[in-house]
Image (cartoon, rainbow, N blue to C red):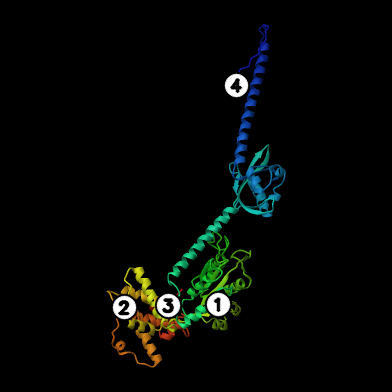
Amino acid sequence: DDRILGHLAVLHDQPLPEDTRAIGIFTIFANRAGAELRRLRRDRDLREREQKLSRLIGSAMDAIIELDSRLVITGLNAAAEETLRCSASDATGETLEPFLTPDARGKLLYLAEELKRRPEGKQSLWIPDGIEAVRTSGDHFLAEATFSHFVLDGQPHYTLIFRDIEERLEAEERIRSLMNETAYLRAEVDALQGFDDIVGSSDSLRAVLVDVERVAGGETTVLITGETGTGKGLIARAIHQRSPRADKPLIKVNCAAIAPNLQESEFFGHVKGAFTGATHSREGRFKLADGGTIFLDEVGELPLELQAKLLRVLQEGEYEPVGSSAVERVDVRVIAATNRDLEHMVAEGTFRNDLLYRLNVFPVQVPPLRERGDDIVLLAEAFARKFASQTGRPSLPLSEDSKVRLKRYHWPGNVRELQNVIERAIITSTGPGKLNLDRALPDALPDAASAHREGAAPSPAHEERVLTVTEMQDLERANIVRALEAAKWKISGSGGAAERLGLNPKTLSSRMKSLRIERPQ
């Protein structure tokens, strides 16, 4: 190719006669010498490339294994030695069998045949879902991998490149767990903003707090009962905070707020691909509560199928995530709450008798607000200070008349309703003076009911007072809520709120929407 390779000198001290034959011999000799020089240079270049490639492969972070046509190891890099916990000298000449699970070996054999059929330029495959590999210690780990094919001396050879992703998966799972726990803790913080503390000194409340102190220090399952809005969640939190598990999470589950088709997944988690939309595995509430406490609010709303699985957790401390046959074990304390009559539900066949026995180990009955006497005023004053601070308004005291009105009201919504009334009063009160409850408290109808119960006539002041449209709406709303509470929030059918109010169920639903009445969560 006319390239100069070097200088070739032949020396002799005797003159040579001109001989074309000798020149031909020298030409052949020069060509042979040039070819040899070219071969030596190619060998040197090849060795340099091999050394560079060897250094590149040796310094790669990914594990690389070279295989012959029978999938026998012909070489591996330092990363593969470290990952598999073996030396190159021990592994070379061995099959992949000791280093892969049967499923992973079957996957590689299938892919090897697939690669043989592929056209040039498409000789590499990403292995779906990775492979499960085995170290010489016997430890299994999940690896993401690629498998490629090349031909050497007419024989197929393969390269397996893989990376241990066990630590990464664990880190991702920890991140997901922390994100879920953060969300639940944020919900707990939001819930805490509804109560600064347990306020009150009535005998009925003191009896509850005595029970809290008695049961908090153990592992006993607690069932808290009481009307909606009485503060069952606050009592559950108090039990947890006084328990040996106080430094572990308290995970709250509102059983009535979870869609039926998602309840099992919310409780027990799911694995990737368990159902449509399950793009990754997710821990359930029980796993998040491991070592701590789980609070099952509105437990009476659980369907029978899920009740059976909850019973298994209570009895054996184990469950199976959705889409998995692997058994998960958890150590959780269970506190449940309901505003429903579970014994009546057992009689109706809508609640498991054995689950009730498991939950009702230590019952705590939270009294309704109307039975707590002066606690109503203490709570109202605490809420007034809180909402005044939040809205930047001056803190207004309660007049004696307001205190009487608050104590006379029936409070169907209990503490939650009192909180809403005081917040509304803070907003509607104008100017200095006392807190004005006229627009905030729908007291006329409850007062009349109280007077009827006590056999007394309504006060003349209330008989003569003309109510505003807003107050009339408040009265209607309070009356509908009272009917719904009495009917356990059942709208239609026998014993439903519509029947109690003498309304068509559709009319009642329309009025509820108009007055923004929603079932408390």
Q: CA distance from mark 4 to mark 2?
A: 108 Å
User: Disc 1 or 3, which lies upstream in sequence?
Assistant: 1
Q: Is residue 213 above or below residue 262?
A: below
Q: Residue furthest left?
A: 431
Q: Are marks 1 and 3 in contact (CB under 8 Å)?
A: no
Instruction: Classify 10 Å Cα crowding around label 4: few (below 14), some (14-19), many (20 and above).
Output: few
Asked if the residues shown at circle 2 and circle 1 are in contact, with their CB atoms under 8 angstroms apart, the answer is: no
Q: Amino acid at mark 2?
A: Asn
| Pointer 4 or 2: first along the chain | 4
Q: CA distance from mark 1 to mark 4?
A: 99 Å
- Residue at (43%, 71%) from the top-left corner? 196
Query: In this figure, which residue is indicated by the disc labeled 2?
Result: 436
Q: Amino acid at mark 4?
A: Leu
Front residue of 296/415: it is 415
Residue occupied by mark 1: 214
Q: Secondary structure at mark 2?
A: loop
Identify residue for label 3.
415
